[in-house]
């Protein structure tokens, strides 16, 4: 026949006869294996479709998770570089899952840093105003010290002048006293003569 076949022989006993009988069966391999081959092909096709669907699901889930994570990482870098203008909508995550929680937490951190920077800027402005006031007070103080020093120099100069005048007066008084003594002695001498 030119085709592969399966052959089977089975002995059969008929009634009480002592004659051995047998039955044989010849089946064509293609006919026997047709349903098995069909099931095998359907199983392989189902497995292939299942694997493709699984790969598609993995890719979609990874894309659904990785894309928002990359956006969060980009915004975190911007915040790290000092950009504190980031708003919650820029994250592009509207879910209330772990990604949404992470976006909320990062946005909250940016908001607190922005508020801290504003507080620091306000304190710096106040400090600058206080420093200007201290500078003005220091200038006034310096002017007062200069005036006081000028007054002290003037008083010192007047004291020196007064001391010099006092010395002159003392010298004049001594001269007058000496002259008066001399005159008194001459008067005493003239009276004794």
Image: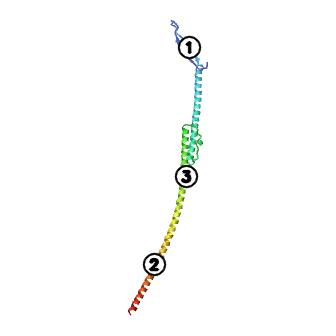
- Figure check: 114 above or below 24: below
Q: Tell which tag, 2 or 3, sits nearer the viewer.
A: 2
Disc 2 crowd, CA 10 A, few/some/many (<14, 14-19, 20+): few
- Looking at the image, which residue sits at the far front? 191
Helix, strand or loop at disc 2?
helix
Helix, strand or loop at disc 3?
helix
Q: Tell which tag, 1 or 3, sits nearer the viewer.
A: 3
Q: CA–CA distance between discs 2 and 3?
A: 64 Å
Q: Residue 141 at x, y = what percent?
A: 51, 64
- Figure check: 28 above or below 82: above
Residue at x 56% of width, y 17% of height: 7
Which residue, given by chain and number where applicable, does mark 1 sit on? 24
Residue 175 is drawn in which quadrant? Answer: bottom left
Mark 3 or mark 1, which is nearer the start of the sequence? 1
Which residue, given by chain and number where applicable, does mark 3 sit on? 122
Is the residue under label 3 in contact with that under label 2 (CB below 8 Å)?
Answer: no
Is the residue under label 2 in contact with that under label 1 (CB below 8 Å)?
Answer: no
């Amino acid at each position: 026949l030119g085709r592969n076949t399966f052959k089977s022989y089975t002995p059969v006993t008929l009634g009480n006869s002592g004659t051995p009988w047998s039955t044989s069966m010849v089946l064509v391999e293609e006919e026997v294996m047709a349903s098995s081959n069909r099931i095998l092909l359907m199983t392989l096709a189902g497995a292939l479709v299942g694997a493709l669907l699984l790969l598609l699901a993995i890719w979609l889930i990874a894309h659904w998770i990785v894309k928002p994570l990359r956006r969060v990482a980009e915004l975190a870098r911007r915040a790290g570089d000092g950009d504190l203008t980031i708003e919650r909508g820029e994250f592009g995550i509207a879910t209330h899952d772990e990604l949404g929680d992470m976006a909320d937490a990062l946005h909250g951190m940016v908001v607190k840093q922005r508020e801290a920077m504003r507080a620091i800027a306000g304190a710096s402005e106040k400090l600058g105003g206080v420093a200007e006031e201290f500078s003005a007070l220091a200038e006034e103080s310096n002017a007062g010290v200069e005036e006081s020093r000028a007054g002290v120099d003037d008083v010192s100069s007047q004291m020196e002048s007064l001391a010099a005048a006092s010395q002159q007066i003392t010298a004049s008084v001594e001269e007058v006293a000496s002259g008066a003594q001399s005159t008194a002695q001459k008067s005493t001498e003239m009276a004794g003569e």
